[in-house]
Image (cartoon, grey):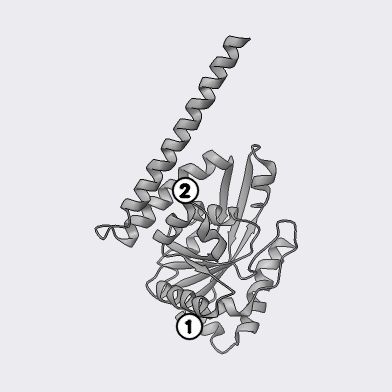
Amino acid sequence: MFQVLIVIGWLLLGLMMAFIATVLILNLCLIELKKEKYTDGDRWKFVSWLTNWAVPLLTFSKTEVDGLEKLDHDHLETGVIYANHYSIFDIFALLKAVKRQHAYIAKKEIGKIFLLNRGMRLMKCGFLDRDDPRAAVKTISEAIQTVKLGILMVIFPEGTRKIHAPLGSFKAGSFKVAVKAKASIVPVTIYNSHLVGKRWPRPTTVQIKVHDPIPYDVYKEMDTPEIAEMVEKIVKQELL
């Protein structure tokens, strides 16, 4: 029995050392990517590659997408994705599913998570501080410029969510990004992402539905509360 305990101890120590080594290597890679010799596309490809193998391995989840072709450059020149929000796994699921370069506007607390914050900044993500109006305006302005470059922006218009809470109302202010960028709005419905942590280590399938994009010409005469109500109805009808 004592020998078995020793073997188990060495195995646990080996796993711990491997984990620490992996974290350090990833951190060094993300620091290296900040150098000017790398383009935004290079940085995105690395983060996308990392997510594609790491997320299924760590979360025992897979992602299924309906309508992914609607995000192709051939169908969508500039766009902002507006999706319902269950948990942080929404970001991981979308990162794995959406193959086109995209970024996120996330709450400032996400910007404090080690490694995740570094990777998201490399992807031109913004971290929104609702308690600092000046900083929030800057984040929104940077997001608008990112969308104009042809990079998709993902926004969760409900804001902060509790896992077991019902779908919240979409905040009208979040739609200023699409309006100012004159970009198409892409409603997206996410299912089951809140079950990933709850069911772990049992496998979970996260499903994503990409709805038809709403061109700027369709909503340009509407005010943001009207836009929010329209998009919320599209996303909600699938969840109901």
Q: CA distance from mark 2 to mark 1?
A: 30 Å
The image quadrant of residue 201 is top right
Quadrant for the C terminus in the image: bottom right
- Residue 193 x, y percent position in the rendering: 64, 52
Near mark 1 (Cα within 10 A), the count class, few <14, some 14-19 or many ≥20, is some
* Amino acid residing under circle 1: Lys
Q: Relative to the observer, which residue lies in front, 211 or 100?
A: 100
- Residue 126 x, y percent position in the rendering: 47, 67
- Residue 20 x, y percent position in the rendering: 45, 37
Residue at disc 2, secondary structure: helix
Q: Relative to the observer, which residue lies in front, 127 or 199?
A: 127
Left or right: where 109 falls relative to 29: right
Where 234 sits versus 202, above or below? below
Left or right: where 178 falls relative to 150: right
Q: Which residue is found at the position 54% from the left and 52% from the top? A: 92
Residue at disc 1, secondary structure: helix
Q: Is any part of residue 150 visible from this angle? A: yes
Q: Which residue is found at the position 54% from the left and 59% from the top? A: 110
Q: Relative to the observer, which residue lies in front, 37 or 92?
A: 37
Q: Is any part of residue 215 visible from this angle? A: no
Residue topped by disc 1? 180
* Figure label count: 2
Residue topped by disc 2? 51
Left or right: where 67 falls relative to 181: right
Q: Which residue is found at the position 59% from the left and 43% from the top? A: 61
Chain-order first, disc 2 or disc 1: 2
Where 16 sits versus 103, above or below? above
Quadrant for the N terminus in the image: top right
- Residue 82 x, y percent position in the rendering: 57, 69
Q: Which residue is found at the position 48% from the left and 53% from the top? A: 116
